[in-house]
Structure formats: structure tokens, C-alpha cells
Amino acid sequence: MIIKSIVIFAFILIISSLGFALYNLIKNKGQEPSEKVLKALTVRISISVVIFICVFIALMTGLIKPEGIGKNIQIYRQMQQAKQTQK
């Protein structure tokens, strides 16, 4: 549950960073993009990369389990491997 809360909080940060960049981009219309826009977009990209790495590590360590299509593919692969070891 804590992992989901962290991911949701990070998505909120990403959206707020995008909103801040959009606000500064519109505010400085016709001028050169400001350092604030660049910094906000850099923060968004950094948070996205960190979230991607954390979710990947959580999947690999088993902290979160795949559901839906990913779970069905995993079950299918396990069944195929069991059939091959029986032969």
C-alpha cells in the first residue's frame, strides 16, 4: 500500500510540475522560454525516471505483483516450462 501511495504522490508532483511549466510558458508568451520552464520540465523528467526505476525494482524484488495481462502471461510461461520439464 505504501508503494502505491508513493507512486500516486509522485504522479501528483509530475502533474504539478507540468502545470507550473505551462503557466510560466504562457506568462512569458512571445519571449524566450525562461529558466523556470526548463527547471520544471527537468524536475518532471527526473521524477519520471526515478519512478520507473523504483517500479522496476519493486517488480523484480516481488514487492508488487503483476496483475491482468502480465499475470496471465507469467502463468502461461510457468505452465510451458512445467510441460517442458515433464518431457
Image (tube, rainbow, N blue to C red):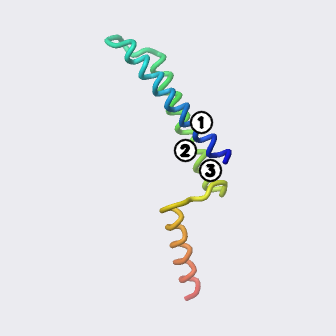
Of callouts 3 and 1, which one flags the residue occurring earlier in the amino acid sequence?
Answer: 1
Camera-nearest residue between 70 and 61:
70
The vertical placement of 51 against 42, above or below, is below
Cα–Cα span, label 3 and label 1: 18 Å
Cα–Cα span, label 2 and label 1: 14 Å
In the image, which disc is placed on residue 9?
Answer: 1
Which residue is located at x 63 percent, y 40 percent?
6
Question: Which amino acid lies under the numbered mark 3 shown in the image of this protein?
Answer: Ile
Of callouts 2 and 3, which one flags the residue occurring earlier in the amino acid sequence?
Answer: 2
Question: Which amino acid lies under the numbered mark 2 shown in the image of this protein?
Answer: Phe
In the image, which disc is placed on residue 57?
Answer: 3
Q: Which secondary structure, mark 3? A: helix
Label 2: how many Cα within 10 Å (few below 14, some 14–19, many 20+): few
Camera-nearest residue between 62 and 87:
62
In the image, which disc is placed on residue 73?
Answer: none
Cα–Cα span, label 2 and label 3: 9 Å
Q: Which secondary structure, mark 1? A: helix
Camera-nearest residue between 33 and 8:
8
x%, y% of residue 55? 59, 48
Q: Nearer the viewer, mark 3 or mark 1?
A: 1
Label 3: how many Cα within 10 Å (few below 14, some 14–19, many 20+): few
Question: Which amino acid lies under the numbered mark 1 shown in the image of this protein?
Answer: Phe
